[in-house]
Amino acid sequence: FPSVPNAQVSPAEVWTCGLVAADRSPRYKNASPSKFYRDGKFVTKLSALQCESSCRLHMPERCIQAEEHAVACVRETCVATRHREAVDAKMVQLMAEQARQKERWEGRIMQAEECAVHDAVWASHVAARDGEIARLINEQDKTRQQAIVDTLQREGSQAHINSLRAQREKEVLRKESTRYMAERDDLLRVLPVVTSIADKRAVKPVKVNVADLFEPGDNAKEINMLQLMLSSHAKALKGAFQGLTLQAAGTTSTGAKSNVLPVATFVGFATFTLSMDQLQSMVHKATKDDRKAGSPDDKAAGLTYAQFCECLVRLAHILYKTELPQLTKRFAYLIENDVVGFEKSKLDSEHSKGEAENGGG
């Protein structure tokens, strides 16, 4: 078309290729512009611009656009149809695959249900068997425990019998040992008397009144033992008594001997161990028989040998009551430690005094 540049007219288009050829044809170069298209045919020759104008009058642009839109719709319809056919084919394929999958899953579900039922039956069977095994094990344990209890009871009864028997034997042995030890102590305490019985003279034994120092009961054995001890240790006791009396008289060992020990000398001898009140009470108990004829308030002037021995026994009872359980043991300890020590100290002092006199002469 003359109104459209050639560059914008494509010879490939169907409805314009004829016009392009006609526009280039020499037939339309000198066409008269006064001739019109009438009654559906060309009355005379038209120019290209007139032909275009005539065509635009009878084929509006909307029709052209409608045809173009229709062509596009047809094309889109064809594309959509092909796509829908492809989708339908795919849906058929997918539905078939779904059916096959459904069949497979149903088969698997049925198989799983059968396996679950089989597993439940097997589990119940295993549980029943485990329960039976547990019951048998429990019965076995109970039987074993009962057997152990029966064995322990038998062994415990026998052990109890053996322990009672051993305890009874130990008690008998303990009593025998206690009796033997008591007899041994008694023999050891009277041993000096027994060994020197042939050398003793037939003299009257010293008697002391110390029954108040014993517990109520059978104390005759202890008193007899005490009398034997006084006889066996008479040499040491008489030596201490004579030493104290000589010390009180102020004479030498060759001077006259006295049979009465002044109370003050005895108190001075024992003051380092007991208090004055205890010593006065002791002397009072030892001399109460001599004061029966006189006034009870009179104080004793002196102690005889028997009263001196009684005071020593009472002194041993007070001094060693905690350490030694028996009075005879306390008295023996007093003789061995205090009386014999006094004798040794007296002999040492006399010896040193004699040496001093010899040295002075």
Image: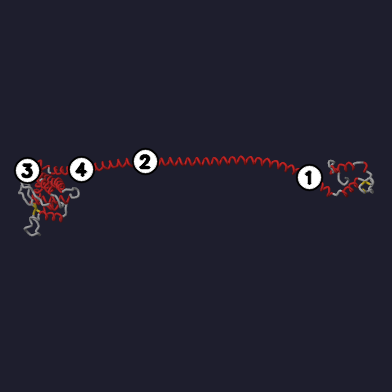
Mark nearer the viewer, 4 or 1: 1
Q: Earlier in the sequence, mark 2 or mark 3?
A: 2
Quadrant location of the C terminus? top left
**Residue at the spot of label 3:** 200
Residue type, mark 3 in image: Lys
Mark nearer the viewer, 3 or 4: 4
Residue type, mark 2 in image: Thr
Q: CA distance from mark 4 to mark 1?
A: 136 Å
**Residue at the spot of label 4:** 172
The residue depicted at 75 percent of the width and 43 percent of the height is 81
Q: Is residue 108 above or below residue 273?
A: above
Q: Earlier in the sequence, mark 3 or mark 4?
A: 4
Mark nearer the viewer, 1 or 2: 2
Q: Secondary structure at mark 4?
A: helix
Pick whichever, 253 or 64, lies toward us: 64
Q: Position of residue 338 (x, y in %)?
A: 14, 47
Q: Secondary structure at mark 2?
A: helix
Q: Is residue 350 visible?
A: no
Q: Position of residue 85 (x, y in %)?
A: 73, 42
Q: CA distance from mark 3 to mark 4?
A: 40 Å
Pick whichever, 188 or 239, lies toward us: 188
Q: Earlier in the sequence, mark 4 or mark 1?
A: 1
Residue type, mark 1 in image: Val
Q: Earlier in the sequence, mark 1 or mark 3?
A: 1
Say whether marks 2 and 3 touch (CB < 8 Å): no
Q: Is residue 200 visible?
A: yes
- Examine the image and state in which quarter residue 192 appears: top left
Residue 281 placement, left or right of 93: left
The residue depicted at 64 percent of the width and 41 percent of the height is 99
**Residue at the spot of label 1:** 74
**Residue at the spot of label 2:** 143
